[in-house]
């Protein structure tokens, strides 16, 4: 869970994909089209899509999540500090 959102969910249908896109938009600040694109590129992994939509490559996003033991909050913090 990240800021009350179930980012660990797997969006298996259209309703859940729409919810996942809203989460990615809220986390990353991107638009709807970018959120759907990030989800598609990430294999509908909400955490990875949020990092990708925030500017990380898919490979770097995977590394950030692995280093953060899957915790999105820590991965986002690491990504933000790396950009400084």
Image (cartoon, helix red, strand yellow):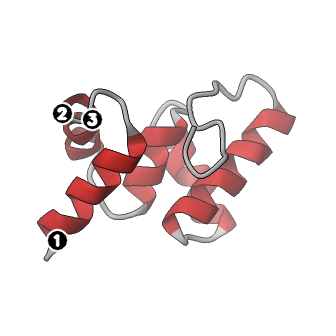
Q: Is residue 76 left or right of residue 81?
A: right
Which picture quadrant has residue 42? top left
Quote the CA–CA distance across marks 3 and 2: 9 Å
Q: Residues within 10 Å of mark 1 (few under 14, many from 20)?
A: few
Q: Earlier in the sequence, mark 3 or mark 2?
A: 3
Quote the CA–CA distance across marks 3 and 1: 17 Å
Q: Is residue 2 left or right of residue 19?
A: left
Q: Earlier in the sequence, mark 3 or mark 1?
A: 3
Which x, y percent locates residue 84? 13, 77
The answer to whether the residue labelled 3 contacts the one labelled 1, judged by CB atoms less than 8 Å apart, is: no
- What residue would you read off at disc 1? 83
- As drawn, the label of residue 67 is 2
The residue furthest bottom is 84
Q: Nearer the viewer, residue 59 or 84?
A: 84
Residue at 47 percent across and 51 percent down: it is 50
Quote the CA–CA distance across marks 2 and 1: 17 Å
User: Which marked residue is nearer to the observer: mark 3 or mark 2?
Assistant: 2
Q: Earlier in the sequence, mark 2 or mark 1?
A: 2
Which x, y percent locates residue 71? 37, 36
- What residue would you read off at disc 3? 62
Q: Is residue 10 left or right of residue 80?
A: right
């Amino acid at each position: 869970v990240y800021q009350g959102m179930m980012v660990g969910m797997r969006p298996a249908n259209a309703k859940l994909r729409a919810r996942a896109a809203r989460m990615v938009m809220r986390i990353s600040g991107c638009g709807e089209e970018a959120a759907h694109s990030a989800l598609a590129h990430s294999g509908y992994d909400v955490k990875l899509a949020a990092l990708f939509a925030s500017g990380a490559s898919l490979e770097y996003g995977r590394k950030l999540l692995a280093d953060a033991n899957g915790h999105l909050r820590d991965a986002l913090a690491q990504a933000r500090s790396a950009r400084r």
